[in-house]
Image (cartoon, grey):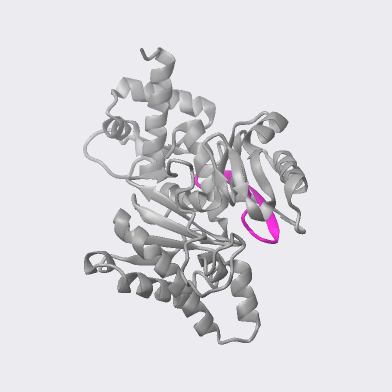
Amino acid sequence: MATPEDVRRANRSLLLRALHRDGPTSRADLAKAAGLTRASVSAVVRDLLDDGLVEELGLSTTGGVGKPATLVGLDADGRHVACLDLSEPSAFTGALVNLEGKVVVRRTHQRQSKTGTAAVTLVKKIVRELLADADRPLLGIGVGTPGIVDADGVIATAAHLGWQDLALGDTLHRAFDLPVAVVNDANAGALAELAFGDEEVHNLICVRVDEGVGAGLVLDGRLFTGSSFAAGEIGHVVVDRNGTVCACGKRGCLETEVSEPLLNRRLESGVDATAVLTAAGGHLGDALATVVSALDVPHVVLSGTDAVISETFRAAAAAAITARTMPMFSDRLIVRAGTFGGDDVLVGAAARILDLGLGIR
């Protein structure tokens, strides 16, 4: 049976979600949107004002006869989230992110090929710096990392960082006594689009290309991680049976044709850039075609370097998907760059903490 505290917490989440989704709103319109009484809404808004999570923004300039309503909205800097992006080959990035998904402080440290315990030590150093920078209450610590990550923040494997069965979530919680969420980097990119993206899309595939290749899947407005938290691990799908031998032992895996270090080497070698990007985009499209068809998700968001989000790469990926799918899929296909550029993993890590801490999704 729900306690009064359970009801209060649920009502807070309802109103915060409505304000996050719709922007500044009157108490009366909040009551309609949330299906609550005006008295309940007024009580919850009063609590949120006291907590510094929302603010009054003056009188509405629209409406009918009678006294204009006072608008309330999220106080974007009422809380911050300490976030880390561990996905880039050469650097770890930390940031403080506000309730609107905006980066307000950024710190970047060169990774210098650190792996294993040394990489964990660098993560802790960045968190300490972010906590020292914080001038607002912190909701928690969000981390986006390569690898397979379970719901408890245990990284089953992240080969490029030398991590296996690493309980990073628990390690950071014990070190800093704050709530911690650890998510796969591609999943973080997908969460960023879901929570803060320019377009309201409830079904999408977010493909992130860094040292490897991974995909975050959003189905019916929820992140889908699979039975073993490995959904979207497409980097070792074979796209060329006669291709290069992969570190996993197979030949012609997607990661041997599409990865940030590989693309950089090929582009710097003097080979025609259009040919390089067309070939790489085509390989990615080959790997995605079955996923797009099987899940009926024609909205593909690309995350990575300028090469990956270039028109040439995107067009090649779209053409490969179109060539391998029915017209009903290809006619609706959208392959676009992510909304947040290089900040998508940071923003997605923040979104996960906002959902856990405030019920904003």
Left or right side of 42 for 232: right
Q: Position of residue 306 (x, y in %)?
A: 55, 71
Name which residue lies at 26% across and 64% down.
329
**Relative to 3, residue 261 above or below:** below
> Nearest the camera: 11 or 126?
126
Which segment did they paint magenta?
A: 84-101
How many tags in the picture? 0
Residue 114 picture quarter: bottom right
Residue 252 forms part of the magenta stretch: no
Residue 351: x and y, percent? 50, 43
Q: Quadrant of the N terminus?
A: top left
Q: Is residue 89 magenta?
A: yes
Locate residue 41, reporting x and y percent.
Answer: 35, 25
Image spot of residue 100 (x, y percent): 49, 46
Q: Does the rendering let one see residue 142?
A: no
Left or right of 274 in this view: 137: right
Please tell me in which quadrant of the rendered image residue 323 appears: bottom left
Placement of 273 over or under 245, stated as above or below: below
Q: Residue at x 59, y 73 (%)?
A: 263
